[in-house]
Amino acid sequence: MNPKHPTQLTNPDRFPGSPGPSAVPWRLLAWCAAGAGLLTPLVAMQFTDEVNWTLADFIVFGLMLAVAGGLVEAAVRARGNLAYRCGVAIAVGTGFLMTWANLAVGIIGNENNPANLMFFGVIGIAAVGAFLARGRAAGMARAMVAAAIAQVVVATVALGLGLGHIFVATAVFVTLWLIAAALFRKSARS
């Protein structure tokens, strides 16, 4: 029995701060979607020669999905604030999308262009900032703003070196980093 509400039964198997039973279908759906995303290239390879993945491609993509899903899962379990959870999902999704685009086709030129390594620096700044913030919302907001600034610096360097115009990609990624920052800021205030 819950001491504050004697008529309400508590679940002894549920850890404090963990999501309730209503969150389980959403988490299961998210992991099933990740699995379906991993199987999509395999199915596409049966119908077209345009998709030609190797075992290494599937392993790398599977690891990317596992890491991204694990980070979001950990945030959902650790924090009860919806704004914080959404901030983590957007930040992790942004890093995932940037990595996937870089490995698949490259953001600057093609996937073999060494200038694309600068984008991993942006993800590194977000990750190190999150680590230094110890997951606290206010620090996470600052880390995401730092990632957005780093994203603009990468675009400026690419433009200055004549490596191409990546304005659209930069605008998308900067917007996503700043949305994550705003969500973390909102979480810190509540």
Image (cartoon, rainbow, N blue to C red):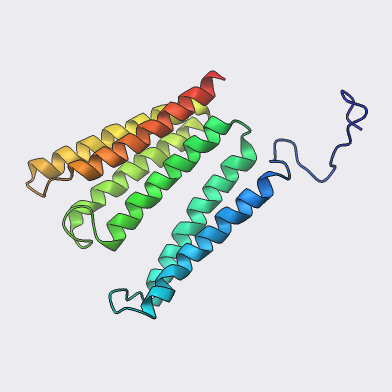
Position in image of residue 124 (x %, y %): 36, 44
Work out whether residue 4 or residue 16 is closer to the camera in this orientation and state it: 4
Quadrant into which the C terminus falls: top right
Location of residue 46 by image quarter:
bottom left
Residue at image point 54% right, 37% down = 85
Position in image of residue 56 (x %, y %): 39, 72
Can residue 135 be seen in this snapshot? no
With 189 as the anchor, is 92 left or right in this view? left
Position in image of residue 185 (x %, y %): 46, 24
Work out whether residue 140 or residue 44 is closer to the camera in this orientation and state it: 44
Q: Residue furthest top?
A: 189
Residue at image point 70% right, 40% down = 18
Q: Residue furthest front?
A: 47
Residue at image point 18% right, 59% down = 113
Q: How many marks?
A: 0
With 74 as the anchor, is 37 left or right in this view? left
Position in image of residue 7 (x %, y %): 92, 29
Work out whether residue 170 or residue 113 is closer to the camera in this orientation and state it: 170
Quadrant into which the N terminus falls: top right
Can residue 89 be seen in this snapshot? yes
Residue at image point 46% right, 66% down = 38
With 187 as the anchor, is 172 left or right in this view? left
Q: Is residue 164 above or below residue 139?
A: below
Q: Is residue 78 above or below residue 136?
A: below
Q: Is residue 150 above or below residue 119?
A: above
With 78 as the anchor, is 39 left or right in this view? left
